[in-house]
Image: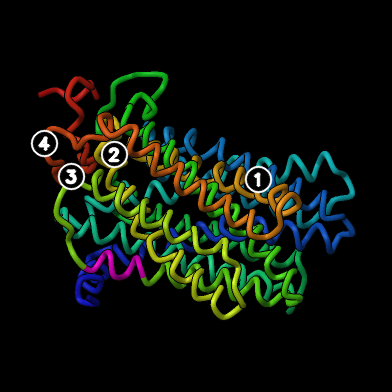
Amino acid sequence: MAAGYLDILRARHATRLLAGTLVGRMPNGTAPIAIVLFTRAEGGGYTLAGALAAAYGLATAVGQPLLGRAVDLYGQPRVQLPSAVVSGLAMALLALTGIGSLPLACAAVIAAGLFTPPLEGGLRALWPSVLGREDRVHRAYALDAVAQEVMFTAGPLLVTLLVAVHSPAAALLVINALGVLGALSVVLSEPSRTWRSAPREAHWLGALRSPGLLALLGAFFFVGVALGSITVAAVAYADDHGRESVYGWLMAALGLGALAGGVVYGARQWPGAPERRLRVLVALLALGYLPLTLTPGVGAMTALCAVAGVFLAPALACAFLVVDRHAPRGTVTEAFSWLVTTFGVGAAAGTAAAGPAVELGGTAWSFAVAGAAGAAALAVLLATGKVLAAPGRAPEVVAGSENDRNGAVEPGFSSGRKA
């Protein structure tokens, strides 16, 4: 199992790109908790803290596909590094000026979110040219999904450590400085500097003109809803048991399950079209969420959370493959960025839905939101089976600048590629 991952990490530039991307994305992965802690330290209430965090999240959702399209048009260094610098400076402005001027604070978090560089989509666009063989690219997608779980676990811990050692303002400054350094490491690498998107057909919808991609985004909106609702439901469960630490145990178990599932999934090659495999993985993901509504004791609930997380990373890794197969030619970074955006918007919607569910029916109802959202994601995939059908021929890893492996498209759908 480890040999396959070591093979990827030994590839030239692979470790640097993966590490640089994870460090560069640290501000995005830690912004909600960092903004909340900073606002509270400045004397703001939870309502203001939540509003500022939500503004950052919404701005990020808007900015990712727009910047992703810019990357496809102009290359990675011209977009990734300037946007990282602007985002970092905006957060530094918040850290240095505080919340005394609410319009300025809102403008700072919106600018920081809007200019968050699309490093996640950019990395997935680079993997084919770095790794060459299709089986290695598939395994890299799984490694990418696993690495995200590590980042979303380690990032908040780093923020809380910086807050404890110094201050929330220092946490904002350090995390965003790391983000700029991570982006710099990526864009100075040879694969990033030489990467060029495949020629694209001019169309105002960009990647969204693909029916298959739209179907996938619809499904993963609901996967995001499920994860967002679990975040709130876990807080309610911890309150029910009178211990704040319980929340940490539940979320850690969820992340550990996802990490284990991703490692196992990426260790082998799976037969058949990824579109069909994705339906199975999302079905298992939905089934894993349903037992959480039982809300047993802390030990059993922690175990259930670990099981619920097992199929998340595999589903994400498989979704990356489906995006790669259905994105119109020349829109690969934008397409991956749309997946990030849709997932994030879904998580925000799930957070919003779980709160009223707790008040109306208790903690079990808030976990039921996750189960219902998982079932909805599966329903979307089943209902859109025809548009998600595998492309007419298998995609190929293309050398040089043609590392957008979207040569195959659905019958009847024009991506602009000439035969």
The amino acid pointed to by label 2 is Arg
Residue at (39% x, 27% y) in the render: 208
Q: Which residue is mark 3?
A: 400
> What distance separates the C-alpha of mark 2 from that of mark 3?
9 Å
Q: Position of residue 314 (x, y in %)?
A: 34, 59
Residue 192, label in figure:
none
Q: Is residue 372 left or right of residue 385?
A: right
Which residue is identified by label 4? 393
Residue that numbered label 1 is attached to:
353
Identify the element where label 2 is drawn: loop
Residue depth check, mark 2 versus mark 4: number of the one nearer the observer: 4
Q: How far separated are the C-alphas under marks 4 and 3?
A: 21 Å
In the image, what residue type sits under mark 1? Answer: Ala
Residue range of the region highlighted in magenta in the rendering: 261-267
What secondary structure is marked by label 1? helix
Q: Nearer the viewer, mark 4 or mark 1?
A: 1
Which quadrant is the N terminus positioned in? bottom left
In reply to whether residue 33 is colored magenta, the answer given is: no
Which of the 4 image quarters holds residue 220?
A: top left
Q: Closer to the camera: disc 1 or disc 3?
A: 1
For marks 2 and 1, give the one nearer the viewer. Answer: 1
Between label 4 and label 3, give the one nearer the viewer: 4
Q: Amino acid at mark 3?
A: Gly
- Which of disc 1 and disc 4 is earlier in sequence? 1
Q: Disc 2 marks which residue? A: 196
Q: Residues within 10 Å of mark 1 (few under 14, many from 20)?
A: some
SS category of the residue bearing label 4: loop
Between the C-alphas of marks 2 and 1, the distance is 41 Å
Residue 78 shows up from this direction = no
